[in-house]
Image: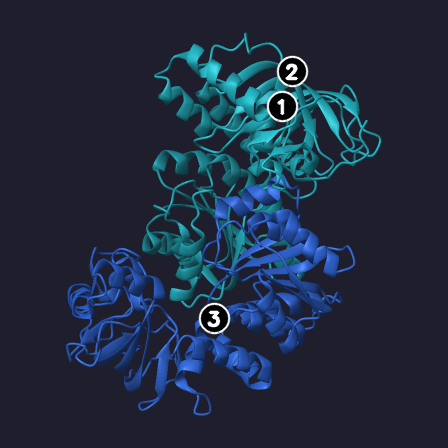
Chain colours: A blue, B cyan
């Protein structure tokens, strides 16, 4: 067991030297662990949706060709990182060995999922992915993966189906950060109004209930279409449900202020994965307020220049996918809120999972 | 004088309807002001550097052709927004008329500069830009411009040369937000350590002194090359000056922690305009710390995924260019810190301004 390891995995980077594992072309997936590492026996890979779509399209739906390329990527890179999309996914497996200095709190036999991307996780496959038809993001697999000292994995709960738990953990940074921001206002004696843009989605529905539980005075759920509004109203996750295209700043702002008696929201949480929502989010947020951007479609410069152009004194946060305890917090929200669970289950059923 | 106006200028948008002025193809630059507007007699445009470079290169250095294209843009769009770079610039002029409901606090005769972009400022030129040779970003001009209710303009100080004041105001959001973040930690009884990446630049040098004055325990200035380090050491703006390439996460992190006795910074301020600094900034920031990104080269997804991949519990702020009082605050810093003023003057002299 090596004593010389970096908590962020620099010792596993083969080339180019000196970069972080995510930026590396090639990682060392050797099974021997360092004193602060953990080895996982892999059971399943969940490929990132964008990555799978790119591969499936490239090979014209030929599952064998998709499987061959995924195997080749993992063999040559020591990790699953699609060279075109740059994205990876997550994995499910069982803890095999835990280094004595690992801070992750895992034990051999734990059934876990990684919450850091496959793009930085050393991975070795031993079964040629023979149980996968190459036609789905869900990849049955045998082999091993390595977690670093500073990494994130969550024990899968016994009381929830694995696909449901994984769907929740996929977005668990959003409710945790929303709760922290709302609680920050509440602790200063100012229960905030909160607008959740995209409130019927996975991260949006969890963020809406997180906001309410953290002390929001009122939660406005914004959705783009009537059938989502109906779902959200039935679920009762928001005090007000309004329809607006989040890419239309004026429409979004009018919808939110209309629901809040003419006032802007103190906290706006952007959970819709479409480009062009920055100006609307700024415009519907009060001076002294906070916008939390969780959408990966967010443009940094559009947000920065938009706020300046609108002379808006708003704090704008880049939605960090990691907060301590985020997975457990999100799973507890799901257990406590049957309506949220029902929305997740309906979505999984629709996806055929 | 029209009574129906929008504080963000929606009533000036000609096409497409319903978008904000910055996103508009064409604005209405009519000189008649609404009750909350202000009309400025234009004296000079300062084109955005990227915009001017694009035009100058496109026309092979032919100043007459550059001038003709700028005139055509302003005539057809009602504002100066380069269709390729999307950027604008600022303007200098004199207040001509102030609507009775304008909240900007300006008076006729005030010598002002706009702090919102030309990309959203209605503009009309009357002199054909005849005093401009088309070979510099500084454009002598006659005509008028309109400020909306919710806009930003600053009165140019009598005690500082206009180019110096404008160089300071161009980056004045950075020191103001840095001061607010540092003061937030200090008020909670925890004087933070602060790393300023790109501390020898305009926004970096102002942010370094802002951090110190707001209560930082120690300021580490990071620069890429030795001659900048020498300048920064002479100026005495930072407690420690270290060399590192901000695009190299490991090098940046080691440089900062080396200067802080092995600890990460509580607050990291990114002021270098090169892509790829996100992971390094996260890696050199302590858990519970804050990264403020001012660089327009920041990638939202690289920051969000980087923090998640590093399991870093850091708050990441999109550097908003606007805070109330930011221009006055930055000018006061310059007046109070002769070393910062000397650095700005040396830079202006080198640029031939």
Task: Report the residue at 61% width, 50% height from top.
Answer: A280
Task: Report x, y in % for residue B96.
Answer: 75, 19
- Labels 2 and 3 within one chain: no
Residue pointed to by mark 2: B143
The residue positioned farthest toward the front in the image shown: A227
> Residue A193: which quarter of the image?
bottom right
The Cα–Cα distance between marks 1 and 2, rounded to whole angstroms, is 8 Å
Residues marked 1 and 2 touching at CB (< 8 Å): yes
Chain under disc 2: B
Question: Is residue A120 visible in the rendered structure shown here?
Answer: yes
**Residue A74 vertical position relative to residue B293 in the rendered view, above or below:** below
Counting residues from the start of the chain, the first of labels 1 and 2 encountered is 1
- Labels 3 and 1 within one chain: no
The Cα–Cα distance between marks 2 and 3, rounded to whole angstroms, is 52 Å
- Labels 1 and 2 within one chain: yes
**Residue A245 vertical position relative to residue A210 in the rendered view, above or below:** above
Chain under disc 1: B
Question: Is residue B215 visible in the rendered structure shown here?
Answer: no
Q: Which of A96 and B342 is in front in this view?
A: A96
The Cα–Cα distance between marks 3 and 1, rounded to whole angstroms, is 45 Å
Q: Is residue B49 left or right of residue B170?
A: left
Task: Report the residue at 55% width, 57% height from top.
Answer: A317
Residues marked 3 and 1 touching at CB (< 8 Å): no
Task: Identify the secondary structure beneath mark 1.
Answer: strand
Residue pointed to by mark 1: B123
């Amino acid at each position: 067991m090596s004593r010389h390891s970096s908590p962020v995995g620099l010792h596993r980077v083969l080339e180019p030297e000196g970069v972080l594992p995510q930026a590396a072309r090639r990682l060392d997936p050797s099974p021997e662990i360092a004193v602060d590492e953990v080895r996982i026996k892999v059971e399943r890979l969940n490929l990132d949706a964008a990555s799978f779509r790119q591969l499936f399209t490239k090979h014209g739906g030929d599952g064998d060709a998709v499987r061959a390329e995924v195997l080749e990527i993992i063999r040559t890179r020591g990790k699953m990182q699609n060279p075109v999309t740059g994205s990876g996914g997550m994995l499910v497996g069982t803890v095999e060995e835990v280094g004595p200095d690992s801070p992750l709190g895992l034990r051999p036999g734990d059934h876990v999922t990684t919450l850091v991307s496959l793009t930085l996780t050393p991975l070795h496959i031993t079964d040629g992915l023979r149980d996968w038809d190459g036609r789905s993001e869900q990849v049955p697999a045998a082999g091993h993966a390595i977690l670093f000292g500073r990494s994130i994995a969550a024990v899968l709960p016994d009381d929830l189906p694995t696909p449901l738990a994984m769907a929740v953990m996929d977005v668990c940074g959003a409710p945790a950060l929303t709760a922290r921001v709302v609680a920050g206002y509440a602790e200063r004696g100012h229960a905030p109004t909160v607008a959740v843009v995209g409130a019927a989605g996975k991260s949006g529905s969890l963020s809406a209930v997180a906001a309410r539980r953290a002390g929001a005075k009122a939660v406005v759920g914004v959705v783009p279409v009537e059938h989502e509004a109906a779902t959200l109203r039935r679920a009762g996750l928001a005090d007000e449900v309004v329809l607006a295209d989040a890419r239309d700043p004026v429409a979004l702002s009018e919808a939110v202020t209309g629901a809040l008696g003419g006032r802007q929201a103190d906290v706006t949480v952007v959970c819709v994965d479409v480009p062009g929502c920055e100006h609307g989010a700024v415009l519907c947020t009060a001076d002294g307020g906070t916008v939390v951007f969780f959408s990966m479609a967010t443009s940094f410069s559009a947000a920065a220049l938009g706020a300046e152009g609108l002379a808006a004194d708003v704090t704008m946060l880049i939605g960090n996918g990691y907060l301590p305890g985020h997975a457990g917090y999100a799973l507890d929200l799901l257990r406590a809120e049957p309506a949220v669970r029902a929305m997740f289950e309906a979505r999984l059923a629709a996806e055929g999972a």
